[in-house]
Image (spheres, grey):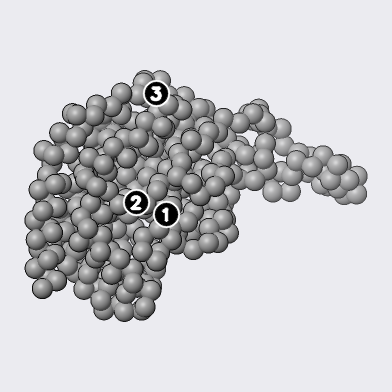
Amino acid sequence: MKQLKYRSAAFLLSNKLDPSAIERVFRAHPMVPSTELNYVNKANIKLAAVQMELRPYRSLSDFILHLQEIVAQAQEHGAQLVSFPEYVGLLPLLISPTFREMGEDFFDALEEGKLEDCRNILNYFSEELSELLFSCYYNTFALLANRSHLYIHAGSTLLANGGKLYERCFLFGPDGEAVLEQDKLFLSPLEQELGICPGEELELCDSPLGRLAILPGQDSFFYETAKAARQLGAQILLCPLRPVHQDNEVAERCGPWSRCQEQALYALCSHFVGQLDSFRFVGKAGIYGPYEATRATQSGIVSRCASESPSVLVSRVNLDYLDIPVDLYAADSNPALAQMLAAAYSEFPQPLEHLLPLTTETDNEEI
């Protein structure tokens, strides 16, 4: 009986998510194209990290208008790239009450440790829903990038390919074409048990905004992936996340923040906030950078949302700061300590002269 119910719901949802229906919504609600990419200065790249509310949608139009509203907020503050959270591509399922209920069943089974039930739901998703959801995801975000004339990092989605299930991320350019695809590389033990497969390669996109790599979820917590990205030439990491625990700040300090300090990179972290059944999604969107790029705050944090309310965080980053050499012994900005050590130890190195002026001004906006 449940299979028949799912089949009927899938048929109804396929009509609602048809590519022509997506196009009609964009025609009915035109977007104002941004001009921020007409001139790009590597010393003034403006990035937007989305702290997105997880909520059910009444219709496809409701879903697309929510995305348009987020992008419009980023546009108002001059963003050139907007990054959405992990698994944003699954949100159209919430249009259907039946599949919203299926999602709740999945989380209930997960909480109770019934992994076989979880695998059955994912198998059904792979066979019946993956292609439909992916088509909606891809077409929606491609049009979103094209109509806004921005770079849109479309978080991630689940995609069945060759009988295997992958978590795949996309970055769309201002013409609506996908300029970067990335499969998640490091899977948690739970993801492996659920049958999700890891990717095999780390990709890079050389864009006017710098060289970009995507490290979804756990990938941004591993030293090896960030090091590989840096060796490939990456300057900005796009890190879509979906934490479901409270200790989010500590977790990020062990993940994207640490990777920025080790590899001299910027990291853009987007999050879901809200509740689905008994699962509460918590997190604060943030933009992190190496110490030398955040001397004003001495924190390695370019900016971070102040609360867990839905918001769009827009900040300016300077790619030139990534090339400042760091002397681990003379990088502390405490002049009294430096003088004391220099007086006590004749071989203590003198502080480096910065290659670039370090300003105390900030240009961070939380909407």
Q: Nearer the viewer, mark 1 or mark 3?
A: 1
Image spot of residue 95 (x, y percent):
23, 51
Give the residue type that dot 3 points to. Answer: Glu
Give the residue type that dot 2 points to. Answer: Arg
The residue carrying pointer 2 sits among few (fewer than 14), some (14 to 19) or many (20 or more) residues within 10 Å by Cα, namely some
Dot 3: element = loop
Splitting the image into 4 quarters, where does residue 147 fall? top left
Instruction: Report if residue 290 is visible in the image.
Output: no
Residue ID for mark 2:
55
**Label 1 with label 3: CB-CB less than 8 Å:** no
Could you tell which of marks 2 and 1 lies nearer the N-terminus? 2
The residue carrying pointer 3 sits among few (fewer than 14), some (14 to 19) or many (20 or more) residues within 10 Å by Cα, namely some
Give the residue type that dot 1 points to. Answer: Gly
Q: Determine the residue located farthest toward the right in the rendered image.
A: 343
Residue at 10%, 48% in the rendered image: 15
In the picture, which quadrant includes the N terminus? bottom left
Q: Nearer the viewer, residue 296 or 291?
A: 296
Instruction: Report if residue 274 is visible in the image.
Output: yes
Image spot of residue 250 (x, y percent):
58, 59
Residue ID for mark 1:
274
Q: Distance between the residues labelled 2 and 1?
A: 7 Å
Image spot of residue 101 (x, y percent):
25, 64
**Label 2 with label 1: CB-CB less than 8 Å:** yes
Residue ID for mark 3:
36
Q: How far apart are marks 3 and 2 (CA)?
A: 30 Å
Residue at 45%, 39% in the rendered image: 312
Residue at 37%, 30% in the rendered image: 72
Q: Nearer the viewer, mark 3 or mark 2?
A: 2
